[in-house]
Structures are given as structure tokens and as C-alpha cells.
Amino acid sequence: MKERKKELRKQIALKKTLYHASTLKDLSAKTLELLESHPTFVAAQTILLYYSMKDEVQTHDFVEKWSKNKRILLPVVVENELELRLYSGTQSLCIGSYGIEEPVGEAFTDYRSIDLVVVPGVAFDASGHRLGRGKGYYDRLLPHIPAYKAGICFPFQLVEEVPSEEFDIRMDAIITCDKI
């Protein structure tokens, strides 16, 4: 299982190198437009998003845009766990683990008030299985959040089958630039 996951991560990383940054930016914009039109997003007041790394669906502008109308939470790596914090503007971000900008401030622990979780991943399949980067951060966090879970990705990250284990949390929807 571990080897299959490792191989799939390698395959997706190779595919990402075939795309120019401007293409990934365009694909990101289209994916986020579909997310915005999703009924769960429209109704949501509190959304757990992520502040993207350069090889993920690019969320920086999206986070800023929606923070004016909705309560946006971002994950922060604290030791081996993800802690959630309220996003209150770019001025409240600092470089954290893995070089990702993370919000400073108090931990957000009212998981039941979260309406939607938007999750990045290395790969997804049509059954909602998700392959992460291998550290298990989301696998440990997601069981505590009863909200609707949407994985977002580029089209080349959708695969026939993601190897999964009993602790892997399925997404309720997978959104890419051309379909939900």
C-alpha cells in the first residue's frame, strides 16, 4: 500500500511539471469558480480553506476575496497536528512549516460550526478517496469535523483509483476545473 501511494505521488508530481504556471493559474480560477457555485459553498458561513503551495489549486486570492463575506479558517501546522485559525488578512500571516503562510492568533476549536471543508490533495478518485502528501495531517483532523468535505484539484490529479486505508476520510465531492 505504501509503495502504491509513493508511486502515485511520483506520477502526479511528474504530470505537474508538464504544465506552465500560467496554465495552473487558469485551471485554478476555473476550479474555484465551480466551487463558488456549489450549493454548500453558497450556504456556508464558516469555511475551512487552505493557503496553497505553488503546486496546488491556487487559493490565495480566493481566501482574500471570500474573507470579506464568510468566516475563513486556515490550517496551521503545530508539531504533528493541524490547528485551525481565523484568517484576518494577509497582514496576519507569517511563514510557517513547509514555507506556507499561516495565520497567527488563537486556535479555532468550534469544529461543529464549520459548514464546509475544502481539502487539497495529491490525487483523488471518483469514490472520494484522497491521497495527501503522506504526513497524515488531514487524516487526523477531518474525523473531528462533521462538515461537508470537498476536495479540489487539477484534472490530471483525478485518477482511476487512490489506494486507501480504513482511516482515510472520503470527500463528499471532488471539484476540478471542468466538473464536480
Image: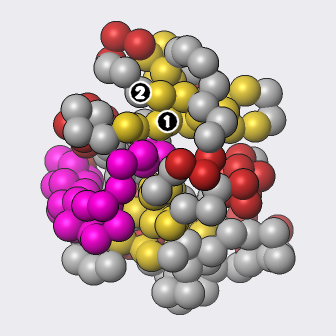
Residue type at mark 2?
Answer: Tyr
Relative image position of residue 67 (x, y in whole percent): 29, 34
Q: In the image, 132: left or right of 3?
A: left
Pointer 2 or 1: first along the chain: 1
Q: Is residue 27 above or below residue 38?
A: above
Determine which quarter of the picture holds residue 85: top right
Specify few, some or many for label 2: CA neighbours under 10 Å numbering under 14, 14-19, or 20 or more: many
Of 5 and 91, which appears nearest the observer? 91
The N terminus lies in which quarter of the figure? bottom right
The residue beneath circle 2 is: 87
| Residue 30: in magenta span | yes
User: According to the image, label 1 marks what residue?
Assistant: 74
Q: Amino acid at mark 1?
A: Leu
Question: What is the secondary structure assignment of the residue under circle 1?
Answer: strand
Is residue 74 among what the camera can see? yes
Q: In the image, 148: left or right of 134?
A: left
- In the rendered image of this protein, does residue 12 appear above or below residue 64? below
Measure how far apart labels 2 and 1 are at the Cα level: 6 Å
Q: Where is residue 179 drawn, in percent x and y?
A: 27, 80
In front here: 111 or 180?
111
Residue drawn at 30 percent across, 61 percent down: 43
